[in-house]
Image (cartoon, grey):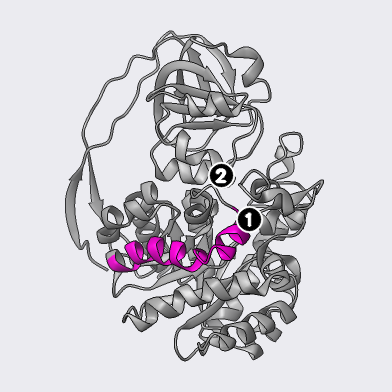
Amino acid sequence: MKIKETKNISITKNRKINVMIILKGIGTSSYIGVGAVKKVETHEDLMGIRDGEIVVVSRASRDMLSHLKKAGGVVTDYGGITSHVAIVLREMAVPCIVGTGKGTDVLENGMVVTLDGKTGNIYRGFMEREEEREIFEIYNPSTSIKVNLNVPEIAEKVAPFADGVGSIRIENMVVRTGKHPLMLLNEEKLTDVIVEGLKKIVDAFYPKPVWFRTFDIPTDELKRLEGGDVEPDERNPLLGIRGIHKDLKNMDILKAEFMAIKKLLDEGYTNLGVKIPFLRDISEYTLSKQVMREVGLRPHKDLDFGASIETPSAVFTFDELVREGLDFVTLGMSDLTMCAVAADRRGVKVAKHFNLMHPGVLKMVELVIKKCNEYGIESCICGHAASDEKIVRKLVEFGIDSISTNPDQILKIRRVVYNAENGRIMKGFGGI
């Protein structure tokens, strides 16, 4: 393994001085934000956000993202580091601190604060910052380093540094229209909306592999969209009607997603693959392939077809999935952990139990990777876990094939994986 090339990347580092910490939450990125507080309690407040303001909201939802992208930072009372909003804001380079519990009570409109997205600390006033230039070497490990994407517009910027896309979360493309997928379907716009967003990504990455994930939007987030009143009330949406189960309840929506893929394949984009999220049972996977055939696509022949392993039931029936046919597998450790340790990943009060490195979770992950290696199926980790250095090193030890990390973590994870691989080699030679 050799260093492929070296580039100078400008990184802003921050040094804290004597500024009072007034609140602490969970940091979701390494970004720093400074600005005046803007509390968002109504739709009018949301529409009135000005560039650079620090938005403080009880709960942030996907439908807010088009407005939050111009914020200087975001603070929430509830939510976790693996929430969709936190992930997308990280891609947009917007500092975000979640799970403060009382941000809307402590922070007042007009108050000037500094957010440290790495530590989760919120300071009153400005934090002095000093800039320095750090050189990152771009490493080329044997393990493939892919990227997760929510925002198509950044694809061209990150494509040179990634070996492909491990997960396109198309929900954001739909949510930013402000309309429920069913409304877009009835207007005959759903497929076109998906094609428009996907095309920017497959264009930027071609011929590198790009894996598309079918819809996985909890009902509470869909309810906020125009036409969202069709959604039921659920006490715990993350364990409710979501993932492929929801799409199979309205197969016309799933067909519209597959039609978007077909349109792109017809245009010559041969680098697309499809994965099915939040499988609870093998029958959901089988039926999804049947629906794909109904739109004129042949899974495993016209394109790669795989599954996202996010439930213990999918882990322990993995051999059945293999017999059904799998070209690749991605591991969603956040949902897998939530299901395994019975802790809502958005729940502040049970956050201490939400441990991605719980021994039970790691044993399931190792089992899946081992079986993938046995059957010659590509394995990939996606989501927040793919940005955690300790978890990534552990997965390299397990023999995972690819790591799909966040856009702002690609260079760091390349280095981490390269060093972990060298560590395995040294260990194999007895540390010589």
Amino acid carrying label 2: it is Arg
Foreground pick, 98 / 405: 98
Residue for point 43% across, 51% down: 406
Q: Is residue 17 magenta?
A: no
371 sits to left or right of 167 = right
> Which label's residue is closer to the chain start, 1 or 2?
2
- Other residues around mark 2 within 10 Å, as few (<14) / some (14–19) / many (≥20): many
> What's the distance in space between the residues labelled 1 and 2, CA to CA?
9 Å
Instruction: State the residue at coordinates (47%, 55%).
Output: 173
Q: Secondary structure at mark 1?
A: loop
Residue at 49%, 63% in the rendered image = 189
User: What is the chief secondary structure element of the magenta stretch?
Assistant: helix
Residue 382 screen position, x and y as percent? 51, 60
**Mark 1 packing: few (<14 Cα in 10 Å), some, or many (20+)?**
many
Tell me the residue at 54%/85% (across/down): 295
Q: Quadrant of the N terminus?
A: bottom left
Q: Is residue 338 rendered to the left or right of residue 411?
A: right
Vertical position of residue 85 compared to residue 294: above or below: above
> Does the residue at mark 1 contact the one at mark 2 (Cβ under 8 Å)?
yes
Left or right of 263? Residue 249 is right
Label 1 sits on what residue type?
A: Ile
Picture quarter containing residue 281? Answer: bottom right
**In the rendered image, which residue does mark 2 sit on?**
62
| Vertical comparison of 260 with 355: above or below | below
**Region in magenta:** 180-203
186 in the magenta segment: yes
The residue that label 1 is drawn on is 217
Q: Residue furthest front?
A: 187
Q: Dot 2 lies on which element?
A: helix
